[in-house]
Amino acid sequence: MTYESEDRSDLIDQLSKLLSVTQDMGRKLANESHGRSYDRVREFNEILHLAREQLTAIEQEEKRMFLLERRRAPRSTFER
């Protein structure tokens, strides 16, 4: 894995953790919301869910690209 791809992997991991915490907070807010604000909280949670799905797709694409790059990398042989 190159330094750049490691940085991207770390960023994706950090975003995933942040989204997880935010989704937990969103669920708590939905449980405590009543009346007019509930619809907005529900919409907010749906947006967070879409963001999670998008981040998962990005993560899968990063892994796929890493494997492709690894296959294309020249193999070195060590002779003794």
Image (tube, rainbow, N blue to C red):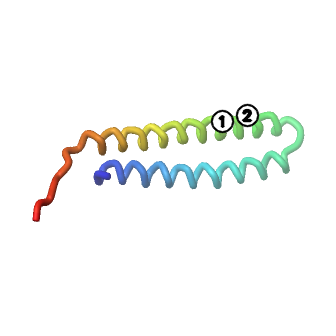
Q: Residue at x 50, y 54 (%)?
A: 14
Kindly identify which residue carries mark 2: 43
| Of the pair 59 and 68, the residue shown nearer to us | 68
Q: Residue at x 49, y 53 (%)?
A: 13
Q: Residues within 10 Å of mark 1 (few under 14, many from 20)?
A: few
Q: Residue at x 73, y 34 (%)?
A: 43
Q: Residue furthest bottom?
A: 80
x and y percent of residue 33 in the render? Answer: 84, 45
Query: Is residue 3 depicted above or below 34 in this figure?
Result: below
- Judged from the image, the secondary structure of the residue bearing numbered disc 2 is helix
x and y percent of residue 63 in the render? Answer: 43, 43
In contact (CB < 8 Å): disc 2 and disc 1: yes
Q: Which residue type does callout 1 highlight? A: Ile
Q: Which residue type does callout 2 highlight? A: Glu
| Of the pair 26 and 69, the residue shown nearer to us | 69
Image label count = 2
Distance from label 2 to label 1 (Cα)?
6 Å
| Of the pair 10 and 33, the residue shown nearer to us | 10
Kindly identify which residue carries mark 1: 47
Relative placement, left or right, of 67 versus 39 is left
Question: Within the image, what quadrant is residue 66 found in?
Answer: top left
Q: Residue furthest left?
A: 80
User: In which quadrant is the C terminus drawn?
Assistant: bottom left
Q: Residue at x 39, y 48 (%)?
A: 8
Relative placement, left or right, of 70 versus 9 is left
Q: What numbered label is drawn on residue 22? A: none
x and y percent of residue 73 in the render? Answer: 23, 44
- Judged from the image, the secondary structure of the residue bearing numbered disc 1 is helix
x and y percent of residue 75 in the render? Answer: 20, 48
Q: Residues within 10 Å of mark 2 (few under 14, many from 20)?
A: few
